[in-house]
Amino acid sequence: EPNHSRVARLYGAHPTTRQAIPLDPMGAAALTPPAWFGGGGGLQSTAYDYQRFVQMLANGGELDGTRILSPRSVKYMASNHLPNNVDLTAFGRPLFAETTFDGVGFGLGVSVTIDPVKGRVPGNAGEYAWGGAASTAFWIDPAEELITIFMTQLMPSTTYNIRRELRAMVYAALTVITCVTIALRSPGQSWARPDTRSATSSSSAPSRSAGNSQARQRRHALTERPPRRRQ
């Protein structure tokens, strides 16, 4: 009860104007203990705690030096478990879900990207994700060492195509930093994997290579230089 005032207000869309309207009766359900633990819905969390949970997965099952899951368990969880490695379009029914169906498989509790081109969304194969009824979303991209967490309170998640736009914005930001890093490479210097993770407000796994540190230094050097004047 002391934390009831911290619970975010739930909104929906007006059936005709599509303007946001409060859904207080539904939101009030979050203030009482559940009569049944469904497992697949109704989770409540702070953004900070959820970030720690997702970071643990991104770290291969470890957080703050404590092993929660084995790396093998996380890898198995984030693998496509559909028969013959097909996507949801081939295996599932044509219903709404928290993820696109084309190029996306399903693991243990998460969607798994098989082919981002087929899914017509930016990203990388091996990325895993899920979302909530109130338009919330998270995904983990091991290839970019990136996690993205999006917290909002808009019911249902079909109201506005927020997730696709968010994904496009995040990966567009990564592209910008990559281009800057390439432009700042010194002659004769070997290519280094850019520190693209700091391009967004998303949290990311700790740096694992000297290349990331070098890229970060080059990016800061660019931002600290005074603008050139045209002659």
Image (tube, rainbow, N blue to C red):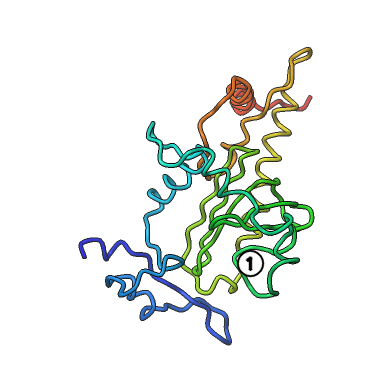
Q: Quadrant of the N terminus?
A: bottom left
Residue 106, by quadrant, is bottom right
Name the foreground residue: 116 vs 172: 116
Q: Where is residue 159 in the image (x, y as percent from the top left)?
A: 58, 74
Q: Residue furthest front?
A: 83
Q: Residues within 10 Å of mark 1 (few under 14, many from 20)?
A: few
Q: Position of residue 78 (x, y in %)?
A: 59, 49
Residue 30, by quadrant, is bottom left
The residue drawn where x is 48% and y is 63% is 152
The residue drawn where x is 26% and y is 65% is 4
Give the side of residue 150 with respect to residue 231, left or right: left
* 174 vs 39: above or below: above
* 123 vs 31: above or below: above
Give the side of residue 2 with respect to residue 143, left or right: left
* 118 vs 182: above or below: below
The residue wearing badge 1 is 161
Q: Position of residue 210 (x, y in %)?
A: 59, 19
Q: Quadrant of the C terminus?
A: top right
